[in-house]
Amino acid sequence: MNSKINAIIPAGGTSSRFGNKNKLLEKINGKEVIKYTIDAFEASNVDEIIICANITIVDELKNIFKDYKKVRIIEGGETRQASVFNGLKSAECDYVLIHDGARPMITTDLINSAIEMVKDKKALTAATKTIDTIKEVVDGKIIRTIDRSKLYNTQTPQAFEYNLIKRAHEKLAGHSFTDDAGMLEELGYDVYILNGSYKNIKITTQNDIDVAKTYL
């Protein structure tokens, strides 16, 4: 029997660090940031894409994606965690991918790799090896240099067995986790690494738009 694969795209933020406009609707080469993200998922092996959106942009998103076969738009929550939980409750599936709407450099190949890997591992996150030297600092003073050989920078997509991540959200409801893999780590579950891409940045500020223009 074929597994059902959903993607949840949290898009409920207010873009407070970006400026007056919602960063997901900022255009790069004439195309909205979130449209790049959704196009990669639309072309992938996921069955349904659930965008958990800030209420202020729901109508605009419905217009942008009105001709998309896989997309469904629902209202997000007060926090990223709450938005993802809304998505999890809105449609049951076998496996679910969770990806930041503001990571438009995601590729369909990486999405499909996550789908294949999660069927075996049950919980994973895209990540890249840390390449900078990392210092621990207290009150402006370097305390130590941390061994970077074991350090990774976490990205999305993250992929999970549906029942596993839904139970984690139920147990940890009301907290403010910014990372779904971290919820499973908190509960003692194993989470694995899928090699991500250094291009798969999250757009947070106007400067990130300039970087994204180069990549896209």
Image: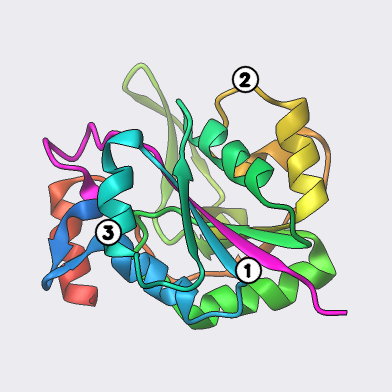
Can residue 203 be seen?
no
Position in image of residue 75 (x %, y %) = 45, 38
Residue flagged by tag 2: what amino acid is it? Gly
Residue flagged by tag 1: what amino acid is it? Leu
Residue 61's place in the image compared with 184, above or below, is: below
Residue flagged by tag 3: what amino acid is it? Asn
Of residues 150 and 126, the one drawn nearer to the viewer in this rendering: 126
Magenta stretch, main secondary structure, is loop
At mark 2, the secondary structure is loop
Of residues 161 and 5, the one drawn nearer to the viewer in this rendering: 5
Question: How was this image coloured?
Answer: rainbow
Q: Nearer the viewer, mark 2 or mark 3?
A: 3
Among the two numbered marks 1 and 3 on one chain, the one whose residue lies closer to the N terminus? 3
Q: How many marks?
A: 3
Which mark identifies residue 63? 3
Residue at 38% x, 74% y: name it: 39
Residue farthest right in this picture? 1
Q: Quadrant of residue 40?
A: bottom left
Relative side of 130 to 7, left or right: left
Q: Which residue is mark 1?
A: 194
Which mark identifies residue 174? 2
Q: What whole-number distance in Å separates the C-alpha atoms at marks 2 and 3?
A: 32 Å
Graded by Cα atoms within 10 Å as few (under 14), some (14 to 19) or many (20 or more), the crowding at tag 3 reads few
Can residue 139 be seen?
yes
Among the two numbered marks 2 and 3 on one chain, the one whose residue lies closer to the N terminus? 3
Among the two numbered marks 1 and 2 on one chain, the one whose residue lies closer to the N terminus? 2
Q: Nearer the viewer, mark 1 or mark 2?
A: 2
At mark 1, the secondary structure is strand
- What range of the chain is rendered magenta? 1-23
Assign the C terminus to one quadrant of the image. Answer: bottom left
Residue at 26% x, 61% y: name it: 33
